[in-house]
Image (spheres, grey):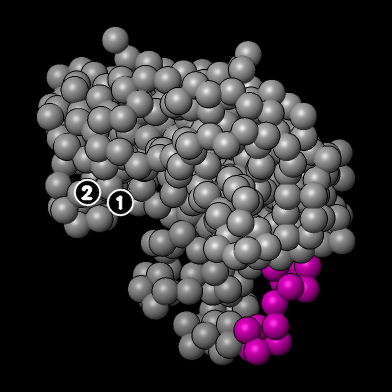
Amino acid sequence: MEMLRFATAGSVDDGKSTLIGRLLYDTKTIFEDQMEAVERASVQMGTEYTNLALLTDGLRAEREQGITIDVAYRYFATPRRKFIIADTPGHTQYTRNMVTGASTADLAIVLLDARKGVLEQSKRHAFLASLLRIPHLVLAVNKMDLVDYDQTRFEEVKDEFRDFASKLDITDLTFIPVSALHGDNVVDRSPHMGWYEGPSLLHHLEEVHIASDRNHIDTRFPVQYVIRPQSDEYHDYRGYAGTLAGGVLRPGDDVVVLPSGFQSTVKSIETLTGPLEEAFAPMAVTVRLDDEIDISRGDMIVRPNNQPDVSQDVDAMICWMNEKSSLTPSSKLVIKHTTRTTKAIVKDLSYMLDINTLHRDESATELKLNEIGRVQLRTQQPLFFDEYRRNRETGSFIMIDEATNVTVGAGMILGESN
């Protein structure tokens, strides 16, 4: 069954957690004891209704403040699809949490309040979704019950958001009017909005086409582990395990191994359940080659006539995630890119990007917690990469503090730097 990963984002009190709670409740994917606990908590908080937001706001601090702080992951399934939801915080100070939660999403739902319209936070979340190259974006205009399900108000909000979205790189944009509190257009079509002819939110999530979103053109197989069984039966077995980050591999394909440049042919592709006739992203497989080549973790198997960029100098957008230090030119870090880990130094900070106004501050000398900027990096070992817009797997990396082993940043590669 196909899996859809989606992230939700929106301003404070726009109803993200309530929407997810409604999806879980109406698809009957929560247990009775969970529901009873939510009902008890709702009574204790003095609300007149069962507060479905409590199904996702799991941290005590979140419940007490009525806000989402950390990324909450929830799982549910329908007969058509499996889903992983990342409920991401809306506040500016939790930008890093949203970047983390949305980085692997196939789709993003940006919620906004029909009464308030498009706020700065709505624009910021749409910008982050476009920056992270999330293929599909849904604008859920929530609390339609509080504007008497008025079509004119929905169209006003829709036009305002579309005007802003036209400045961004968004390939698929859908507008759905909903009331998360009452369930209108969440799982089932609403009887209160006969003027709306589109699908319910769940129907859209079930039907949105994601199979072609992945890059099946550029074959990229980062080697994660070399399998050499220590037994007489398999004494000559040598397999390379990993997850395909792009493209398709088949037995008989000519391949080249980076960085050595040695060429070979795929002998077989195997999984725990047996051999495969083909493998495609994002399948985890073991690849065997016809020739014995010295290959280790961090190397990459690609096709001879379709190779990634190979360079020690990269140009990237960075989201800085560390509150104890800032990123500056000359900062030394460890970079983890696909399965390769290497040291790096920041050569230059081109600008810091204001994610509210999209203004580029070229006078910035550092990136602090939750700030996003463009930097040039020099790595100790070459990276094998594609531009992030072409392949999110081979175009992204994380930055690690060598002293503490803490992840301090996430990056999206724009290309090779000069």
| Nearer to us in this view, 106 or 182 | 106
Q: What's the residue at 80%, 55% (across, down)?
A: 274
Measured in 3D between alpha carbons, the distance from the residue under mark 1 to the one under mark 2, in whole angstroms, is 6 Å
Q: Is residue 131 visible?
A: no
What element does badge 2 sit on? loop
| Residue 233, percent from left and from top | 68, 62
- Quarter of image, res 150: top right
Image side of residue 60 versus residue 235, left or right: left
Q: What's the residue at 71%, 65% (across, down)?
A: 76
- Number of the label disc, if any, that sits on residue 107: none
Q: Quadrant of the N terminus?
A: bottom right
| Residue 368, percent from left and from top | 20, 41
| Crowding at mark 1 (Cα within 10 Å: few <14, some 14-19, many 20+) | some
How many marks overall? 2
| Outermost top residue | 418
Q: What's the residue at 52%, 85% (across, down)?
A: 41
Disc 1 and disc 2 in contact, CB within 8 angstroms: yes
- Number of the label disc, if any, that sits on residue 407: 1
Which residue type carries mark 2? Asp
Which region of the structure is painted magenta?
24-36
| Nearer to us in this view, 140 or 213 | 213
Q: Is residue 287 magenta?
A: no
Q: Is residue 54 visible?
A: yes
Image side of residue 366 versus residue 74, left or right: left
Q: What's the residue at 65%, 58% (across, down)?
A: 234
| Nearer to us in this view, 299 or 1 | 299
What element does badge 1 sit on? strand
Question: Disc 1 or 2, which lies upstream in sequence?
Answer: 2
- Number of the label disc, if any, that sits on residue 401: 2
Location of residue 195 with respect to 180 vertically, above or below: above
